[in-house]
Image (cartoon, rainbow, N blue to C red):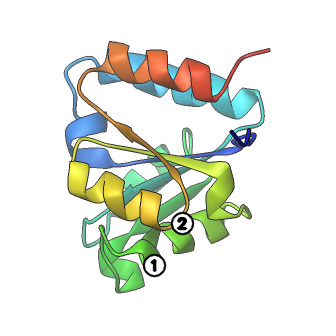
């Protein structure tokens, strides 16, 4: 088994950051960034207002909206765009989404896929992938 150190975390918006317990996930994103993990929002949304984007930069180093880059999940190209914006190869990134189809696209691009079912389960899995120490 090959061990790879993950340095980038990509997260979908709808279904993950809209979870009723999402405040815990936002706290995790802030602490992960403090530990040097690069973070990106990757969503199939057409785009967002500058105001929304500015608040998202509290949690994300990069914002990738499918409507702005011209390619959508699950096309592997959109995951590569997001990894590139983080300055990382896809193989050093994990992607969190509630859609199995979108997870498969991330895995095809070379990422580790994490299927979101609940904030607690996702945070448990991320604790293994991105150890705090």
Looking at the picture, does residue 92 appear above or below residue 126?
Answer: below
Looking at the picture, does residue 39 appear above or below residue 124?
Answer: below
Sequence-wise, the earlier of marks 2 and 1 is 1
- Residue beneath disc 2: 82
Looking at the picture, does residue 88 appear above or below residue 58?
Answer: below
Residue 94: image x %, image y %?
Answer: 54, 45
Q: Nearer the viewer, mark 2 or mark 1?
A: 1
- Please give the label number shown on residue 100: none
Total number of numbered discs in the rendering: 2
SS type, badge 1: helix
Residue 84: image x %, image y %?
Answer: 65, 70
SS type, badge 2: helix
Q: Quadrant of residue 77?
A: bottom left
Q: Quadrant of the C terminus?
A: top right
Mark 1 and mark 2 in contact (Cβ < 8 Å)? no
- Lateral position of residue 123 relative to residue 36, left or right: left
**Residue 72 in view of the camera:** yes
**Residue 51 in view of the camera:** no
- Residue beneath disc 1: 77
List the single residue furthest toward the bottom.
70
Question: Going 36% across and 64% down the picture, which residue do you hit?
Answer: 105
6 or 65: which is nearer to us? Answer: 6
Question: Going 71% across and 44% down the picture, which residue do you hit?
Answer: 7
16 or 75: which is nearer to us? Answer: 75
């Amino acid at each position: 088994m090959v061990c790879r150190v993950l340095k980038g975390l990509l997260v979908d918006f709808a279904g993950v950051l809209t979870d009723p317990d999402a405040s815990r996930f936002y706290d995790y994103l802030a602490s992960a960034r403090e530990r040097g993990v690069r973070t990106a929002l990757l969503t199939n949304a057409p785009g967002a207002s500058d105001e929304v984007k500015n608040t998202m930069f509290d949690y994300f180093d990069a914002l990738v909206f499918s409507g702005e880059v011209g390619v959508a999940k699950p096309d592997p190209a959109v995951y590569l765009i997001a990894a590139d914006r983080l300055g990382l190869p896809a193989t050093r990134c994990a992607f969190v989404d509630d859609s199995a189809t979108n997870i498969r696209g991330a895995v095809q691009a070379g990422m580790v896929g994490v299927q979101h079912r609940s904030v607690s389960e996702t945070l448990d899995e991320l604790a293994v992938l991105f150890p705090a120490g």
